Image (tube, coloured by chain):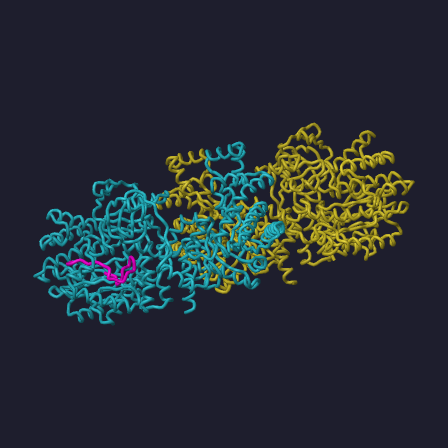
Chain colours: A cyan, B yellow
Amino acid sequence: MRELLGGKGANLCEMVNMNLPVPQGFIVTTEACNNYYENKEVLNDNIITQVYEKLEELEKNTGKKFGDKDNPLLVSVRSGSRASMPGMMDTILNLGLNDEIVKNFMPNNKRFIYDSYRRFIQMFSDVVKGYDKSKFERVLDEIKKSKNVTTDIELNEEDMLEVVNKFKKIYFEISKEEFPQEPKIQLLEAIKAVFRSWNNERANVYRMMNNIPYSWGTAVNIQEMVYGNLNENSGSGVAFSRNPVNGVDELYGEYLINAQGEDVVAGIRTPKSIETLKEIMPNIYDEFYKYAKILEKHYKDVQDMEFTIENGKLYILQTRNGKRTGVAAVKIAVDLEKEGLITKEEALLMVDPNQLEQLLHSSFDQDEIKNKEILTKGLAASPGAGVGKIYFDAESLTKAKENGEETILVRLETSPEDITGMKNSNGVLTVRGGATSHAAVVARQMGVCCISGAENVIIDEKNKIMKINNIILKEGDYISLDGLTGNVYQGKLNTISFELKGDFKEFMSWAEEYGRIIVRANADTEKDALVAKKLGAKGIGLCRTEHMFFDKNRIFNFRKMIIANTKEERVKALNKILPYQQEDFEKLFTIMDDEKVVIRYLDPPLHEFLPKEKIEIESLAKDLNISYDELNQRINDLKEFNPMLGHRGVRLDITYPEIAIMQTRAIMNAAINVSKKGIKVHPDIMIPLTIDVNEFKYVKNIIQTEINKILKENNINIKYKIGTMIEAPRAVIISNELAKECDFFSYGTNDLTQLTYGFSRDDSSKFLKDYYDKKIFEKDPFKTVDEIGVLKLVNISKEKAKNSNSNIELGVCGEHAGDKDSIYNFDKIGLDYVSCSSYRIPAAILSSAQSNIINKRA
Amino acid sequence: MRELLGGKGANLCEMVNMNLPVPQGFIVTTEACNNYYENKEVLNDNIITQVYEKLEELEKNTGKKFGDKDNPLLVSVRSGSRASMPGMMDTILNLGLNDEIVKNFMPNNKRFIYDSYRRFIQMFSDVVKGYDKSKFERVLDEIKKSKNVTTDIELNEEDMLEVVNKFKKIYFEISKEEFPQEPKIQLLEAIKAVFRSWNNERANVYRMMNNIPYSWGTAVNIQEMVYGNLNENSGSGVAFSRNPVNGVDELYGEYLINAQGEDVVAGIRTPKSIETLKEIMPNIYDEFYKYAKILEKHYKDVQDMEFTIENGKLYILQTRNGKRTGVAAVKIAVDLEKEGLITKEEALLMVDPNQLEQLLHSSFDQDEIKNKEILTKGLAASPGAGVGKIYFDAESLTKAKENGEETILVRLETSPEDITGMKNSNGVLTVRGGATSHAAVVARQMGVCCISGAENVIIDEKNKIMKINNIILKEGDYISLDGLTGNVYQGKLNTISFELKGDFKEFMSWAEEYGRIIVRANADTEKDALVAKKLGAKGIGLCRTEHMFFDKNRIFNFRKMIIANTKEERVKALNKILPYQQEDFEKLFTIMDDEKVVIRYLDPPLHEFLPKEKIEIESLAKDLNISYDELNQRINDLKEFNPMLGHRGVRLDITYPEIAIMQTRAIMNAAINVSKKGIKVHPDIMIPLTIDVNEFKYVKNIIQTEINKILKENNINIKYKIGTMIEAPRAVIISNELAKECDFFSYGTNDLTQLTYGFSRDDSSKFLKDYYDKKIFEKDPFKTVDEIGVLKLVNISKEKAKNSNSNIELGVCGEHAGDKDSIYNFDKIGLDYVSCSSYRIPAAILSSAQSNIINKRA
């Protein structure tokens, strides 16, 4: 019942059914949340009545009474949506306390009561009222300073009372009213706050990034409090049933004695490793280990559990499938399969394809770091090798990133506000917080390298510097983070690329076995092609020939071709380019031995290749031996109002058939040379942006005539295919006719998306944020293929094409071809292949397998 | 059998069946032409054999022999395609002559023989060989000069022999071989030349302009020669059975004594009016009149006939339905109906909707021209009032036109090369040529004002000046042409707009009666709306609100709105615009009393309204009281890579709902004010560029909330509709969902064409010429809706929309809505209305009627 109760709530209910020690409580459903938003953010009476009824039941079951000054029922209030959203939702503990209860309750443990009350006031102020929590923290810091102590735990009863009074004073100053004393009011306010938190900016960003629909809503979990901060025989902790960083089968987690749960994950006090609990409270450790394994078996997955020890008794507060790094995800999946807990299919479904990119993280050159001095060492919180310039706030970092800088985020501790900064960084370094701190959890999920708890680092945020031992680093200085060891290095270290081996290799071999839709690579260079091959690409599905011209030695002749005034001049320049292009194709054919290489003919508008700045134009004019004015005039002539909708793609070949002829010659010469070496070549010639059958036939005829000439001259036969990209809606509509002329189609869903929506990728980023903010769009149509519009067109085209040419091969190239949800859809409608960028290939192969498994089951 | 024989050939056959005096002959079919092109421009043996067979038959029937030196068969070779293409195709007369025949044949009329031979040599050189005909003309001019005569006819036998010899010499000099002496070779070469002329540039341009498919091909008519140049009892002429300029029921035409047909239409000698034939050869005149009426009755249409008188005997060489001006077309259609020759339906089908625009030509202010001196007078060859700067060649004129100038083409005589120049001019003035000259025929068809035969005009092409009496006018000087009277005025006269009256009014009332699809106007101003109403528009189908902002007084606040940094600033600026906009709507509602007014909300990207030049930016910055840098920065921020695919249409309302609110207020306030005066208002609110249902609902909700508020405040009820434009392919695909939310759709087929093809109108003009040249495209998809792609999408959308909302109203706005073929298609798929620019309304109403008549018949 995750839909109704949220993940947290559903798991609590399951644990109760399994007789695990869970504090009693009840759940306000996600339906109530949706009702709240439909009802213009007001709780309706029906919901309030039901809450009160359940509260009464809870009072009966616990023998405590809400608001009773001697035996009060205190509760925790937590959010819980269908999908886990770490750090996004707000929690309130100790709800139900007021001045009167605090005065009367537990006369022998006043420190605990004051501690609980001050926590409650702060959380309520922060979460429900949205007051600036730093005001409260400053008070706490001042008192600790005046008492000359460093941690909360060192404050005594009187200190805590002082904190409570000062907190109440702050509350009054801000709100102009007393802290609410009526527990029921506290509860309703808290429920509403949880609902509201579903709609805050952070939550919206997270949902966007993770494709979680707004309509899911969040549930609210209301549970009787258990007190980890009751005394020294109490504590709170968080632990995984297996190591979420590397996947090893061991308990992995942290706890704090005499603390409430928030202390552990907030990163304020550095908690102790769960291993130490084995010595301090061996029975509790064993009991916890037992529950962990029960839960793991029940959920057939690694569990991430919160627990509290109240005066020597263990409670499980929450369990959920544990987030993990890509490395861990793969190892765990393979291990669970080997342990017989799950099937290969289940193992394949257990790993998020998007996480696989993390396994492709580069690492440092071991020879180089052997001799490199370690600046400091923290916890290895998220793997990878992160190199970049340091920034101390998310905003500066993001700006630097936008300017093309490589960045590292350095923070005392991270808060949810840092999410954007983390996303834009190559690595995160925090002073406080353990391996389960916010920074660590989020970094792991994002696949960003992270070192946390590097306690030797002293940050001076104001002056934007940090001090490690005696070394001072300022904003913009380079550091290098090794997320596998926790080592921090000064300067910019070299990174080396990954290897496909071990569990990862095995896992990928399963994926290849289970997939149907073929995965090819977008690769334009030898380097791309080698990576693609290593990662399992079945050939090249998109070689963008224009990328081959950007090289300094080549761009000159290419530009000469562009500004040519006559066909003769153009052909002359093209003939100079021919050998380069031929050489590139020879390399690609050689690497892709016996696999397809789909070569797209020149696509972008020619003016994109010309210089824009005056100084560059002058320089080029000199090189070309023409006047500045002449060149400038030519550049202006080529300018377009809407380059996306301009003279590009096959249109270039219509105007300048000599370009198509040169590219054809380069391909066929290369194919002949390579095949003479005994390598099998399968060149596929792909015409971009076709919109008309006559247009395609015209160019096809030019190409075939040239090919026939070359093959005859060389007295050899090479099999080749000719196809087109389907990018314009008109190409979709005429697919039946086009299919008769084509050996294959490749859906260019980037351009098809732009033309279907009528907005360009570059220009739409400006206004699409308004669409997300206003809940008009929930997904980025350039990331995941639009099911309602673009996918429908692809499907229409596919039906038409297959009807008139049942042998036609149909694929997709472009961003969507590497996206999980899009691949599911492409698989579902029966396309033959996807072609994505090299580093997305494992994700695509896994997505292909998952889709096939899901569809077979369906 | 027009498809096979061409129009000319088919009509010749019909006339033979009607026992009219037609020279004998045979026809090479259009199939042979297509075969010639399929066969790589080679005549195949089968065709040649058949030509020879038919030639033998012709010899038998005429008793003459091809190549015989004493009794030679001479033939004319003429092109003739299914559709008439005046001036495009090439004709050869006197074919079959050679040196030997010339020496022997007709010893008593050597002048005639030499005259015939020199004509043949020149035509063969020009048409078959493509040699520069001016070389031949120069020789003729020199001889005339040396003999001190002005016309060919004054040259005697010896002079003509000299001409023949010089012509042969020129031929030899160019071709390095003797003029071909074998008649069969001459014939085959001539047939090929006719076929080739189907594919010359002029023909291709003409076909493009008139939507004639390339695949039709041309036939070749081969007929026994009859000799209008035999003697003074012979002659050639061209005449219409009714006046093609004004439609009056009278013979209208010209002839020349002792001349071949080419002399009459070439405009070299100014021919005599057909009226004078009545006196010179009354029997021939009566006989011709009789045939004219027989043919008119047979074809149920005005005939355009060529005739030759050979030594007192009349031959009809050709008949075809006569081209006519729009004015004449309407009068003739109405008259023929009244004469009982045709039905109303036939009358409606007889007029080309595109010609109706000619009836909307302005004329000169009669009071002004009363006092204006007439510079000179020529023949009133094509009606209208043409005002512009004079140019003496098509190239300079076209350049000036592109720079926004109004132009008049002045030529000694026009040739087919001038077509583009004529198209780009407001009027044509020629020195030579009668009312049936090339210039006159083409100008009438194009609806361009034309005065021909203005013999007082002396042109100095080299110095780009002309002299009329003693007044010298140079390139770029203004003149004014009155195409109704033939008067030429110096300077720039004022024109006044047309009136809908007489035959035109009656004809349009029939059209309205027979049409189904409703015709509305694109009108943004009071002036537009008044014209539209006068021309029969049933309300406004597209009011582009942004056009209302370009006024100097308004643009300032509009720009202020655009560069506003906050919502408050924006609202402030919008509030200043509101009263203007409201006032405009009040005017439109008042004019369109009880008819719909469809108002499109702000559509173009905002940056389009901002200045581009530094000096303008500085000035605006000063006015806005901000710094240049700030304004420039804001302008740069708003710039887009692809404005067509940018922040425009409904996207503006999503980001700035305050714009939609202002526009809503202006509409509803206007509607309330106007309806209080007893005028019935029907405001339709139209959201542009919708791509998503949520997007539409979001904006609709804002608008409806505002409307409800205003109506409540005013305690009044105004009925209104809300709909959207369908411009993006995604809107097509989601039409079923959108239709549930919309009262109407308007297909914006301009943008839909751009997005379906993936090229913009502005950018594609550069490369689409290659598509036409290479026969990839035959029609301009921005002129006539693309049946294969765009129309299919419209139909898909329509089906989806009607399925989910059977009451939805569906229309089209944009260029296609005024195009005949497009309207036929929109009618066929069952759309409810089209909305086009005011001056296209009669054409649209007639197209609507024609479509309905055709479809009912089908």
Above or below for A14 versus B52: below
In the displayed structure image, the side of residue B695 where residue A627 appears, left or right? right
In the displayed structure image, the side of residue B798 where residue A822 appears, left or right? left
Quick one: B494 or B656, which is closer to the camera? B656
| Residue A259 sits in quarter | bottom left
Residue B375's x, y, as percent? 68, 32
Q: Residue furthest left?
A: A108
Q: Residue furthest top?
A: B470
The verdict on residue A257 being magenta is: yes
Residue B122's x, y, as percent? 78, 40
The answer, for residue B841, to whether it is visible in the render is no
Quick one: B557 or A322, which is closer to the camera? A322
Quadrant of image for the C terminus of chain B: bottom right
Quadrant of image for the N terminus of chain B: bottom right
Quick one: A115 or B223, which is closer to the camera? A115
The verdict on residue A409 being magenta is: no
| Residue B416 sits in quarter | top right
- Bounds of the magenta segment: A239-258
Residue A122's x, y, as percent? 19, 54
The answer, for residue A761, to whether it is visible in the render is yes
Quick one: A571 or A157, which is closer to the camera? A571
In the displayed structure image, the side of residue B143 where residue B814 appears, left or right? left
Above or below for B516 versus B411: below
Q: Residue furthest front?
A: A677
Residue B497's x, y, as percent? 60, 43
Q: What predominant SS class does the magenta segment belong to?
A: loop
User: How many marks do you count on the picture?
Assistant: 0
